Image (tube, rainbow, N blue to C red):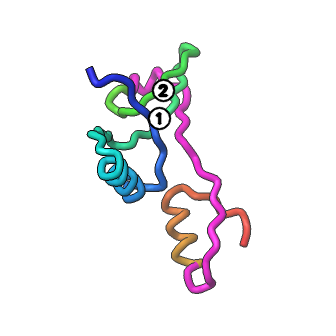
Amino acid sequence: ALGFGFRCGFLGLLHMEVILERLEREYDLDLISTAPGVVYKVYKTDGTMMELTNPSNLPEPTAIERMEEPIVNAEIMVTTEFIGPIMQLCQERRGRYIST
């Protein structure tokens, strides 16, 4: 058994690697890290809700009423030369433009 663990949030994989390295080096810890996961909420037609981190555990499509995934409200500030590419990137990721 591994004992108790911690669920930590980082600002990206590089940030996670830096923190893990410092904990191992400065505190002589043996750490085990796992890949980050995204939790999806699946509301089924029978009225129940499931939280999934693995798409292979999805119920049959006919049993799904709706699904919810994490979203981000972001304010992106860039110079005018990057507005076009940034807007395109956001639209490709199902982003919604509000204003400039």
At label 2, counting other C-alpha atoms closer than 10 Å, the crowd grade (few under 14, some 14-19, many 20 or more) is some
Q: Amino acid at mark 1?
A: Val
Q: Which residues are magenta?
A: 58-82
Q: Quadrant of the N terminus?
A: top left
Mark 1, residue position: 39
For the view shown, which residue lies furthest in the right direction? Answer: 99
Asked if disc 2 and disc 1 are in contact, CB closer than 8 Å, the reply is yes
Residue under the point 38% across and 25% down: 4
- Check the image and report above or below for 59 versus 88: above
Q: Quadrant of the C terminus?
A: bottom right
- Check the image and report above or below for 78 versus 45: below
Q: Is residue 26 left or right of residue 49?
A: left
Compare residues 50 and 8 and report the one nearer the observer.
8
First of labels 2, 1 by sequence position: 1
Q: Position of residue 25 (x, y in %)?
A: 30, 52
Mark 2, residue position: 51
Q: Position of residue 40 (x, y in %)?
A: 48, 34
* Residue 70 lies in the magenta stretch: yes
